[in-house]
Every structure is written in C-alpha cells, then in structure tokens.
Amino acid sequence: MTTLTGLIGYPISHSLSPLIHGYWLEQYNIDCAYKLFTTPPARLRQTMNHMRRKKLKGLNVTVPHKQTVIAYVDEIDATAKNIGAVNTILVEGEKLIGTNTDASGFLASLKEGVGELTPYLENIVVLGAGGATRAVIVALQEAGAKRITLTNRTAARAADLVEEFSQAGGARLGYVEWESREELLKTATLLINTTSLGMHGMERLELSLTNLSTDAAVIDIVYAPLETELLKNARARGCKAVDGLGMLMHQAAFAFAAWHGVMPKVDATLRNKVLATLATRIKEEAAR
Ligand code: ATR
C-alpha cells in the first residue's frame, strides 16, 4: 500500500522538497508519496488533526509553522528542543515526534564543501539571528566550535540568542553591532550568512570581504541565486565557498533516512535536477 509523507507550510507551492524526495523514493523503489499540504497559520490545528487520521509515515514542516507545530505533536526530541523548532515529524505508533534535521543538514553540507572542519571552527562569524541561525548555532556547537560571534541588524535578537545558547556551554558566544560586521572579519575562520539578504527579490548583502583571510571559508544558506554575491566575492578572494543548496538537500536526506530507514545519496544528478528547476522558475518569474 502506498504510504504518505509531505510538507506543511505557507506558502509552499515553490517547494523543492517533492522533487528531492520524489527522486529518492524512485531511486530506492519505495512505494510512498510526498505531497504538499498548503497550511495557512489559521488552519494548522485542523491540518495536524487531519494528518493524525491519515496515518502518515512522516511530515516536513516549514515556515511559518516550525515553532507553532510543537503544540500539536506528542513529543519533541533533544535536537528540536535545542533548536526550538521542528522541521520533521516522525510517526511512532499513535505518537507524533518532532525532530529537526536542519542542524545536521547544515553540518553535512559544510563538511562536504570544506572537508576537515577543525581549522574553520576557531572563530566563526554568523550574519543573522533568525530561525535559521538557531539551527546553525546548534550545529556549530555540536561540531565543537570554539567561538561564535553573531551580528544582526536587530542587535537585541542576537543578544537573546547569545544568552539562550551560552547556557548550553561549549562555544564562546558573543555579538557585535551590524554596523561593525566588516571589522569582525579580520579574525574570522568561517563566515556564515543565515539572513535572507542576497536572495532573489531581497535586498543585497552589503559586505566587503577585504578584511577576510583567504584561508577562511564562507557558507551561504541562500540558494536562489546559487552563486550569491557573497559567494562570488569569497571565491574571487580564493576562499572556500559553499552554497545553500547543500543544506537544503542534506536536511531532506536526514528526514528521508528517519522515515524510510535508508540514508539517500545527495548526488550530482539530484543537484542538477534541482538547479534546472530553479533556473526554469527564475525565467518564468522574469517573464511575468
Ligand atoms: P529565518 O527564520 O528564515 O531565519 P527570520 O527569522 O525572519 O527568518 O530571519 C531573517 C534574518 O535576516 C534576520 O536575521 C533578519 O534581521 P532582523 O533580525 O534584523 O530582522 C535578517 N534580515 C532580513 N532583512 C534584512 C535587511 N534588510 N538587512 C539586514 N538584515 C536583514
């Protein structure tokens, strides 16, 4: 019998998850569907009740439900608790268990891009203090980061994250004002953009990399465009640069593994399929 997985969020019509999961489901010959369940915030309770009745195999959760969905699951695991958000729901008997694969997805992508992580964990600069930043901090702490400095347009959000995540121990956490972000780059071993700046349709990320060592690595969580201005500038300096598509595909891989018991490969064919879809979309949007 065909089983069911899928994604709840709003809006999600442009989600790449059906393509990614569909590719692996076919590759591993698993009789399961992956569907989009468009869920405006006011319908979250109703959708979650519906999902329980449908006897799902699992569910992905995206914006704007990653935090609010916690009220509708029976348990959340330690990773979801640390991040404070759920992006994947597992079904164990009658129970819905919330977990989060964003941190492992981020780490897998970073490792794939830079190789041995140790040299990059000394002095990490993180741009942003939103939902994505939380998963990135958890990932970095797990990886053994030494020092993490946040910088965000709204400094109070960075201050809150520093306070919250300092309690977990591990990395030394701090923040500096957004206006001083270029100064911070002087000692950075790894620079991470977790803001939406540089994404199609969003504002530019204004950041000169003149202060950044050529030994440093740069990772962007933005994947549309794939080669952001930040990554282009990083590569031009000779820095290792990692795009945001890796995190998207690896977080999906961890969810797939949790549901289906097989760790799927993030291979070049999949990456090219995703890139082709993104390119088509950009063309369609430009034609509108
Ligand atoms: P997500 O959950 O995807 O991380 P978010 O919580 O809205 O989304 O966070 C978006 C991040 O991009 C935030 O760090 C945000 O800064 P603020 O906390 O000041 O809002 C950052 N961001 C968005 N637009 C920005 C802009 N024009 N300039 C600087 N930072 C911006």
Image: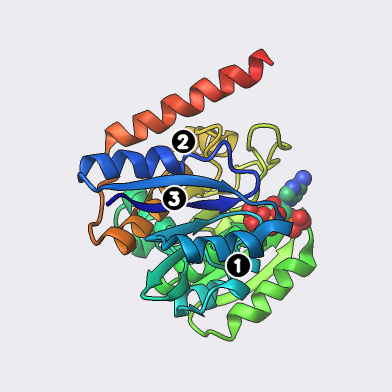
Q: Is residue 153 visible?
A: no
Residue ranking furthest to the top: 287
Q: Amino acid at mark 3?
A: Met
| Residue 235, label in figure | 2
Q: Mark 2: which secondary structure?
A: helix
From what the image shows, is residue 214 above or below residue 175?
A: above
**Does the residue tagged 2 have its C-beta within 8 Å of any atom of ligand 1?**
no
Q: Nearer the viewer, mark 2 or mark 3?
A: 3
Q: Which numbered circle lies on residue 247? A: 3
As drawn, 284 above or below 258: above
x then y, percent, for residue 206: 71, 40
Quadrant housing residue 43: bottom right
Quarter occupied by residue 19: top left
Measuring 65% from the left and 75% from the top, which residue is drawn there? 162
Quadrant showing the C terminus: top right
Amino acid type of disc 1? Val
Which residue does the numbered mark 1 point to in the structure image? 69
Q: Does 71 sit left or right of 115 as displayed?
A: right
- Between the residue at mark 2 and the residue at mark 3, the CA separation in whole angstroms equals 19 Å
Q: Amino acid at mark 2?
A: Arg
Q: Position of residue 286 (x, y in %)?
A: 65, 17
